[in-house]
Amino acid sequence: MQAGGAASLLSSLRIGILHNPGSGTNLRSPSAMHRVFGDHPEIPHRDVKDPESVAQALGELAAQEVNTLAISGGDGTVRAVLDVLLARKPFQRQPLLAVLRAGTTNMIAGDAGLHGRPDAALACLIERAARGGEDLGLVQRHILRIDPGAGQTPIYGMFFGAAMISQGVEYCKNKVHSVGLRGEIGPGVTLLRFAVAMARGDRDIVRPVPVSVSIDGAAPTTNDCGIMLVTTLERLFLGLRPFWGEEDTPLHFSFARAQPRCWLRALPGILRGRPNRFMTPANGYVSHNVRRLQLGLDSPFIVDGEFFSSVPGSPLVLTDGGAMDFLCLR
């Protein structure tokens, strides 16, 4: 977005709040956000808990001419908002998004949201908006569009994962979060557990997933997959950047075979997105920035931490769903 257009938007913010009381941080500190709501009764807010309530709330906020959505929820709540905004388009012009760290992992907020406690960040956003957008900025991120095929509704989000990624999310939710390890620590512990299992070739932990991949219309290749991710974020939890493609296209795609060579030697470069001599296609590692992926995948996958199932016999197609503007605090 051009500087002049950004300044014009930031000087006339009309905020509406979507609040998921069941998201991780909100659930643990239910009174914190309500104190901010009480201090600013002039700002409309809606509680949401599922896709239907998100759609209804967005329709109501659009009717009130809100142009900035503060999202007090986790990655799944943000994904539900993106689904409505991009599929149903309740706003004449897409609103700015201000994502609060109010969930459990908060990967989207960590890259393109407002840092700090969600109640403090929201209060700061409201104060700065009242001052004409002083010390607010914008970052732009593209949105993934996932078409499951067979006439299914597209899914919108910012992070897609399969094989070890989806298996790791399941493990994290069932084994790690249940003992109180939340925030970025939980995924970090899970990553360590699965990295060790992959080094040992432990297929009871990291289960290979057969997948065919076609990149930007090229002929598909088929492999047993150990890791697959596609994201439009520029950093993941703990600041990781496990993608190193050089193409000027919006979707970061990374893939590792089920038994890649030199795994422990390649791993530091993979996590930082800095290729070393072990991170080669011959050793089982691929990363590109792409426009379109077509996947033959018959196992569950995740989008922003939520599980989805492939339609048997139908390819998954991942493309650029468009760009959105996210507010940040300078």
Image: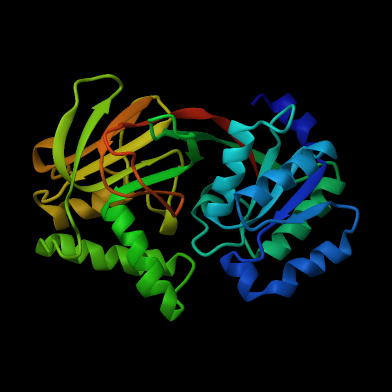
Question: Above or below — where is 21 with respect to 235?
Answer: below
**Can residue 7 be seen from the camera position used here?**
yes
Q: Nearer the viewer, residue 301 or 24?
A: 301
Q: Is residue 329 visible?
A: no
The residue drawn where x is 58% and y is 49% is 78
> Which residue is depicted at the point 30% across and 63% down?
191
* Nearer-the-camera pick, 96 or 267: 96
Say how many tags the image has.
0
Looking at this view, name the residue that lies furthest to the right. 42
Picture coordinates of residue 88 (x, y %)?
64, 32
**Residue 118 coordinates in the image, percent (x, y):** 67, 62
Picture quadrant where residue 256 is located? top left
Residue plotted at (38% across, 64% down): 187
> For this view, does 282 lie left or right of residue 87?
left
Give residue 214's position: percent from left, percent from top.
25, 27
Residue 252, picture quadrant: top left
